[in-house]
Structure formats: structure tokens, C-alpha cells
Image (spheres, rainbow, N blue to C red):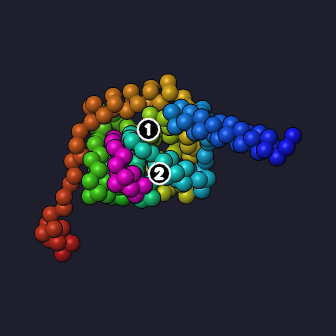
């Protein structure tokens, strides 16, 4: 074989690899390959995994949360909203009375979390991202969960029937949720009490 024939073979081989790469990229754009990743705390990377998934979100993030005090996760949700991602948050009613909750931060940043008052405790810790990714486990979205508690987090991808079930559960809780009752402090009364 002469050099021209080798060049044609090499070009054909490169073209086939390029076509394979493009088909694989298109497949991953439309279909998420099944995977499950497990994270554990304290200090096992749960918060980093959640933030990474939020940063990859393109369309929608649905959140069911009992407690929410992780500033970095809250900021990642705000950043996603600023990128045009639809954020829908349902919080347990305890967030209306907690001092350190991020509910007030969400409200200040233009997110509109709602409260689930229907249950004694809305103890969910769930995120559904872009109808493809499910985050769940015992891990509350808090600094204490990351740094002190023994917690677990699963990042589940490519299981549409499971994502669909969690999304239906989200909408069930969302349907009986209400706007938060934000308590404002009367500064004059607070001053009188302090005196």
C-alpha cells in the first residue's frame, strides 16, 4: 500500500471514531445511564455532591426538605435560579420558627419556598433534578449534617420510574403546602423587652 491508501484508511478510522463519539454524546444528552453513588457524613462529601448536581441542573429542581441551614447549598439553588432553572422548594413548618433556617434567605433572593403544614413533621430530604437525577437519604441540607452527624446520601441517575415516583410525591406535598407565615419582630416591642 502506498501513502495515499494509508492516509485514506487513517481518515476513515478517524471519521468512525468521531461518529462514535457524536453518537455517544447524543445518547447521553437524551438518556441518562443508570448509576447510583453513595456518600456518607460527617465530612464525606455529601454537600459537595449536592452542589455539583445543582450546578449541572438545566431546567428544574424540586426540593423537599425538613431542615435547611446549609448556606452553600442554598446559594447553589439561588445561582441555579439566576441561570434560569425553575426551583420549587417545600419545607417543613418548623422552618417558620427556626432562627437559622435558610427560608428567609430564599425569600430575600426571590425564591418562593412553601410550607408543608399537613404532617406532624415533613421529614423528607429529597431533590429531583431535571427529571433525571434523584438525591435522597437521611442527609438534611444543613451544616450539622455535613460536619457532625452520621448521615447518608444517594445520588441516583437513569432510573426514570423511581424519579417519576418521587416527583409525584413532591407534587402531592406541594398540593397541600401554603405560603410561609413569616414572623416580623416589632422593633419597639423588642427594645422595650430588652430594657
Taking the image as shown, residue 37 lies to the left or right of residue 136, namely right
Q: Looking at the picture, how far across and down is residue 72, in whole percent?
A: 45, 58
User: Relative to residue 192, is residue 182 depicted above or below?
Assistant: above
Of all residues, the one furthest to the bottom in this rendering is 195
Residue range (magenta): 75-93
How many residues crowd around disc 1 within 10 Å: few (fewer than 14), some, or many (20 or more)? some
Q: Looking at the picture, how far across and down is residue 157, in whole percent?
A: 55, 35
Mark identifier at residue 130: 1
The quarter of the picture where residue 190 lies is bottom left
Residue labelled with disc 2: 55
Q: Looking at the picture, how far across and down is residue 43, in whole percent?
A: 60, 56
Taking the image as shown, residue 83 lies to the left or right of residue 177, namely right
User: Residue at left 65%, top 36%?
Assistant: 20
**Depth check: 23 or 47 in front?**
23
Of all residues, the one furthest to the right in this rendering is 1
Q: Looking at the picture, how far across and down is residue 172, in whole percent?
A: 33, 28
Element on which disc 1 rests = loop
User: Residue at left 37%, top 52%?
Assistant: 83
Confirm whether residue 17 shows in the render.
Answer: no
User: Relative to residue 166, is residue 6 depicted above or below?
Assistant: below
Indicate whether residue 17 is drawn in magenta.
Answer: no
User: Residue at left 21%, top 48%?
Assistant: 181
Amino acid at each position: 500500500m502506498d501513502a495515499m491508501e494509508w492516509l485514506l484508511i487513517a481518515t476513515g478510522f478517524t471519521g468512525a471514531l468521531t461518529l462514535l463519539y457524536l453518537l455517544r454524546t447524543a445518547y447521553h444528552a437524551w438518556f441518562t445511564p443508570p448509576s447510583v453513588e453513595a456518600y456518607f457524613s460527617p465530612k464525606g462529601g455529601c454537600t459537595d455532591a449536592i452542589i455539583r448536581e445543582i450546578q449541572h441542573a438545566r431546567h428544574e429542581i424540586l426540593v423537599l426538605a425538613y431542615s435547611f441551614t446549609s448556606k452553600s447549598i442554598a446559594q447553589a439553588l439561588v445561582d441555579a435560579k439566576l441561570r434560569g432553572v425553575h426551583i420549587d422548594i417545600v419545607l417543613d413548618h418548623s422552618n417558620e420558627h427556626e432562627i437559622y433556617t435558610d427560608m428567609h434567605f430564599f425569600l430575600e433572593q426571590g425564591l418562593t419556598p412553601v410550607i408543608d403544614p399537613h404532617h406532624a413533621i415533613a421529614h423528607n430530604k429529597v431533590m429531583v433534578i431535571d427529571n433525571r437525577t434523584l438525591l435522597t437519604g437521611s442527609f438534611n441540607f444543613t451544616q450539622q449534617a455535613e460536619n457532625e452527624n452520621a448521615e447518608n446520601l444517594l445520588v441516583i441517575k437513569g432510573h426514570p420510574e423511581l424519579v417519576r415516583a418521587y416527583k409525584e410525591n413532591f407534587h402531592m406535598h406541594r398540593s397541600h403546602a401554603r405560603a410561609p407565615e413569616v414572623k416580623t419582630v416589632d422593633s419597639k416591642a423588642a427594645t422595650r423587652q430588652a430594657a
